Image (cartoon, coloured by chain):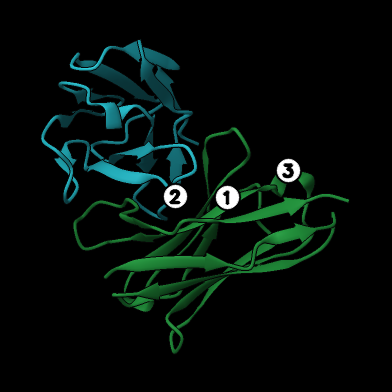
Amino acid sequence: EIVMTQSPATLSVSPGERATLSCRASQSVSSNLAWYQQKPGQAPRLLIYGASTRATGIPARFSGSGSGTEFTLTISSLQSEDFAVYYCQQYNNWPVLFTFGPGTKVDIK
Amino acid sequence: EVQLVESGGGLVQPGGSLRLSCAASGFTVSSNYMSWVRQAPGKGLEWVSVIYSGGSTYYADSVKGRFTISRDNSKNTLYLQMNSLRAEDTAVYYCARVPFNTGYYYMDVWGKGTTVTVSS
């Protein structure tokens, strides 16, 4: 079973600053990694899939990188609407099973 | 507009059953993979189950043997039958679409969720 970890658990950032979130897999997941944003009381929203491809309608300030076991989500200049919890998620190839990381909360410094 | 709307949540006693529904619009459920994900109060996301376009089904170990995922193509609706419910099944349950035509597997459309509370 692949275990996902995320760091830090909480990231305090000032608006306009850069935020870097990390996600690590216990074994290689190739580029089979997605990122989601979740705000309180809302469903998750897909940000990134395939480790680095932005989903439809996602602003360019969100970028993903990495492959294998180490992945990064970067928010280049935090806007007020970006304060939320971010989850990474891996998927095995066959059968398709999904594992989420524990999440990183990005809050206002 | 592509949309998913869950229903069927509520309060149920331990050992009881509940069936969740997820009505889709703007796309065809049977042409996609469809999944259920849950979130316990104050906790993170947990994948529950997936049904492939071909009909194969898979479950997280935590619900295997108790939950059943299915779909009704004529109603374009996804279901989750939950039996032998436990307190730890208390969560918001989301249904989500898993597009499979990109070579990657992720959840691109989510419903707003339905709340299941298991308590006596």
Rendered residue at 52%/56% (across/down): B113
Residue A93 horizontal/vertical position (percent): 34, 50
The kind of residue tagged 2 is Leu
The chain shown in green is which?
Answer: B
Residue A68 horizontal/vertical position (percent): 26, 29
The kind of residue tagged 1 is Ala
Rendered residue at 40%/54% (across/down): A96
Name the residue carrying label 3. B88
Q: Earlier in the sequence, mark 1 or mark 3?
A: 1
Rendered residue at 57%/67% (across/down): B7
State which chain disc 1 sits on: B
Contact flag, marks 1 and 2 (Cβ < 8 Å): yes
**Count of picture labels:** 3
Name the residue carrying label 1. B60
Contact flag, marks 3 and 2 (Cβ < 8 Å): no
State which chain disc 2 sits on: A
Name the residue carrying label 2. A97
Asked whether the residues under marks 1 and 2 belong to the same chain, the reply is no
Q: Colour of chain A?
A: cyan
Q: Nearer the viewer, residue B21 or A91?
A: B21
